[in-house]
Amino acid sequence: MYPKTISKEEIQGLPLVRFDGEIHVIDSHKKVNGVFRKLESNEFLGFDTEKKPTFIKGQYHPTALVQLSTLHEAFLFRISEIGFHKGLKRLLESDEVKKVGISIRDDIAELNQVSRFLPKGFIELNNVASDIGIRKAGVRNLCAIFLERRVSKNQQTSNWENKVLTSAQANYAATDAWVCAEIYYQLSKKGYIDNGIY
């Protein structure tokens, strides 16, 4: 059984989680070769996006990064550098591979501002959590409740349009997507995921 809720103090007492798998930064078209074939061979992937933060009212920055992660490898697509690749669009429109994320409605809406696509196969972990009685939503809360780990948000407001991502940015981005895949995997293993629904 999982706790229905968790306090900020309890979260602060948990050890930090950090993705320790292989991270692939896709920032040129030659790095795309073979990537989508590998991703499409998975039953599910963790999903997240990042964009340059805005500090001035009315300012807008498009999505700069799309993260997709297996349990062992994370792929960071720098769409600010290479655009919205047709293979990425195909994957995000596929029913065959589940894309699992947290608070993904805005991510999908923002991505549609970059290039129109019809999202299919997405699973919102906030909804899954709610269905099993969890009253705390969001990546920090769900990671704490399901994985008993704390997610760092230190890089959230960094510049995702930098010419080169720092290693701290890459790890932060990979971790956010991987956490979604790991939560889904753990819930599946414990029988909380009914494949007919999720």
Image: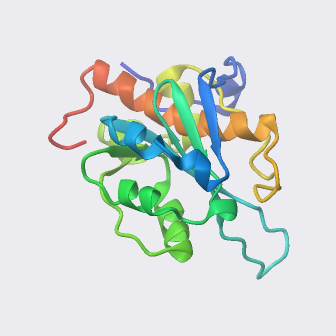
Q: Nearer the viewer, residue 55 or 161?
A: 161
- The structure residue drawn at horizontal position 73% and vertical position 76%, both measured from the top left corner, is 60
- The structure residue drawn at horizontal position 19% and vertical position 36%, both measured from the top left corner, is 195
Q: Nearer the viewer, residue 84 or 33?
A: 33
Q: Is residue 8 above or below residue 14?
A: below
Query: Is residue 188 toward the left or the right of residue 45 in the image?
Result: left
Q: Is residue 4 visible?
A: no
- The structure residue drawn at horizontal position 69% and vertical position 22%, both measured from the top left corner, is 16
- The structure residue drawn at horizontal position 60% and vertical position 38%, both measured from the top left corner, is 176
Query: Is residue 99 toward the left or the right of residue 26 in the image?
Result: left
Query: Is residue 64 toward the left or the right of residue 37 in the image?
Result: right
Q: Which x, y percent locates residue 54?
A: 79, 68
Query: Is residue 174 toward the left or the right of residue 108 in the image?
Result: right
Q: Which x, y percent locates residue 131?
A: 30, 41
Q: Is residue 119 above or below residue 71?
A: below
Identify the residue at the far bottom of this view: 58
Report the quarter where the C terminus lies. Answer: top left
Q: Quadrant of residue 171?
A: top right
Q: Which x, y percent locates residue 152?
A: 72, 33
Q: Is residue 89 visible?
A: yes
Report the quarter where the N terminus lies. Answer: top left
Q: Is residue 90 above or below residue 72?
A: below
